[in-house]
Image: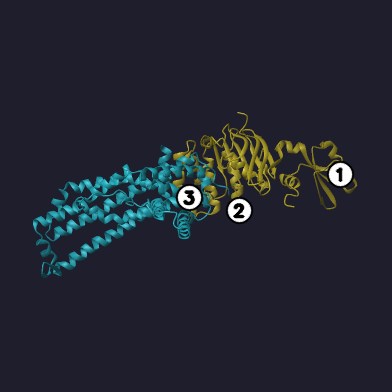
Amino acid sequence: MSGVLTAKGLNKHYGKHLAVDHINLAIQPGRIVGLIGPNGSGKTTTLKAALGLIPFEGELKVLGFDPRTQRDGLMNEVCFIADVAVLPRWIRVREVLDFVEGVHPKFNRQKAKDYLAKTKLSPEMKVKEMSKGMIVQLHLAIVMSIDAKLLVLDEPTLGLDILYRKQFYQNLLEEYFDENKTIIVTTHQVEEIEHILSDLIFIREGKITLNTSMDEIGERFAEVMVNPDNYAAAKALNPIDERTIFGKTVFLFDGVPRATLAQLGELKTPGIADLFVATMKGTYA
Amino acid sequence: MNTMKWLLKREYWEHKGGYFWAPVVVSGLLALLTIGSMLFASVAGSKGGFHLDGHSSISLQQALSSISASEKVEFAKGLASGYPAVAMPLMFTLGFVVFFYCLGSLYDERKDRSILFWKSLPVSDRDTVISKALTALVVGPLIAVAFALALSLLVLFSLMVLAAFHGLNLFGPVLGDRNFYLVIVQILSFIPVYVLWALPTVGYLLFVSSWAKTKPFLWAVGVPVVGGVILTWVNALAGSPFVLESYWKVIVARGLGSAFPGSWLGQVAESNVNINPDNAVSVLLANTYGLLGTANLWIGVAIGLAFLAGAVKMRRYRDEG
């Protein structure tokens, strides 16, 4: 098996609109991949294709399964949270645990109970009596107790306050993730997942604009704070972005040797957010 | 198989209101109504007020004791085979519950997006749709029939206890009647035919439920009815090219109404039999099983299965949100 997820020429049309435009992608096991893009860039569509929720064109294998024809087998190995608070409102904590235990061969009920013991959720509680944050806690408790090879999280914390968001990712990293598992996550709160990611994929208008590991980011990208006298020299090295702070200019470079840049001013590895903004400029223009 | 067990449980948890509480409430009301009126007659009649054969104002006791032995045997025979009739409204309730359950089940999970949770588990679309069809066709009817029999027996025994209180002992003749037991088996025997008969309606409603973006009720009921109205106009303008009677009968009544138990009665022409309380259930059952020899039933089954297959396909790729 070549990878957890491999896509070759993945295409998805909605009418005439091309939501996913010939994407090629390979995700290796044991990684935590951030799939980052503006609204409507095709990230959710890509994930839905991978999870067999929508038809698509092109080639796509997830854990060796074709999501179009082998979805039932795939779902034994894959788990996902496709949106916030999608647990059915009528169900009780006890019932949802019973059901998942009954239908999922890889669900460990004790694990879920241990996790829920740390929350305010009780077995008889119905989802409709819970806050959004509590629903996410319940969903996460279920997902973390399933020994899946791939976990896909599409905006799992949207609309939650910072306490729940922090807790969510911390639990994921400490209690769930190991080298045999792969996590793909999309979110708007880029800064919050920056430190847990091992790989980063930027997607824009259905195309991948950046696909790199976090280690490579430090090697490839650099931010330099340049005094006005070095402005022309810096500009000559083709920066991908520039902004002004306190009379100095901060340039963002891609693939320019650090030694060269060090002569122009103070060097820094850019954050994902800065990289994202620089790469996505003009998206909404 | 284990997955199916949990899927059926899941449906029951979610729709306990329709499949359990609705029959509880209807049975309760029926019990209250029938047993209440028997008690009322028993209390009010103990001092007189019955008018029988020209005697004015005799008591219930006197009225019952004036019943001849042969009349008593007739009465007991009627009771022994006719007692489930009191539970008929439960079957009507079942029709409504099944109708709206099917119409909602595949639509609601998309509306509240819980389909994204269900589809994250290793359960196929096929098994999910089958579990919903089985809930409508088998689980619901079994529960309804269980309630119907319990209610019927409760009312029958209340009647017999009250009668005994007033000097009329019916226990022996009723419990000694073969029909008393046979009728239970006969009532259960309606279920397999109900499964086949209701299949096209259940399949159609589940399909609309899996397909409609909004307002499944309007689509499911509105399209056939508006179709009929348009055909009526065409008929009025163009000199009746369509036989509308069969449209309403086949598409609307058969297509939408078959979830109601007993809606098949009258499909098979009855030869001249004398229906009396003694043989009513047997005659109805024979008539019902006569359906197995009609194309009507089996074409319906085929259409129902096709709609179910369509619902599976729909659910597979429906969520575009």
Marks 2 and 3 on same chain: no
Badge 3 element: helix
Who's the residue at 23% across and 56% down the image?
B155
Q: Residue A235, labelled with which disc?
A: 1
* Image spot of residue B260 (x, y percent): 35, 52
Residue B17, picture quadrant: bottom left
Q: Which chain is cyan?
A: B
Badge 2 element: loop
The kind of residue tagged 3 is Val
Q: Along the polypeptide, which appears first: circle 1 or circle 2? A: 2
Q: In whole angstroms, how far apart are the C-alphas of marks 2 and 3?
A: 39 Å
Residue wearing tag 3: B208
Residue wearing tag 2: A161
1 or 3: mark nearer the eye: 3
Q: Which chain is yellow?
A: A
Looking at the picture, does residue A40 appear above or below residue B34? above
The kind of residue tagged 1 is Lys
Badge 2 vs badge 3, beta-carbon distance below 8 Å? no
Crowding at mark 2 (Cα within 10 Å: few <14, some 14-19, many 20+): few
The kind of residue tagged 2 is Asp
Return the residue found at the far top.
Answer: A1
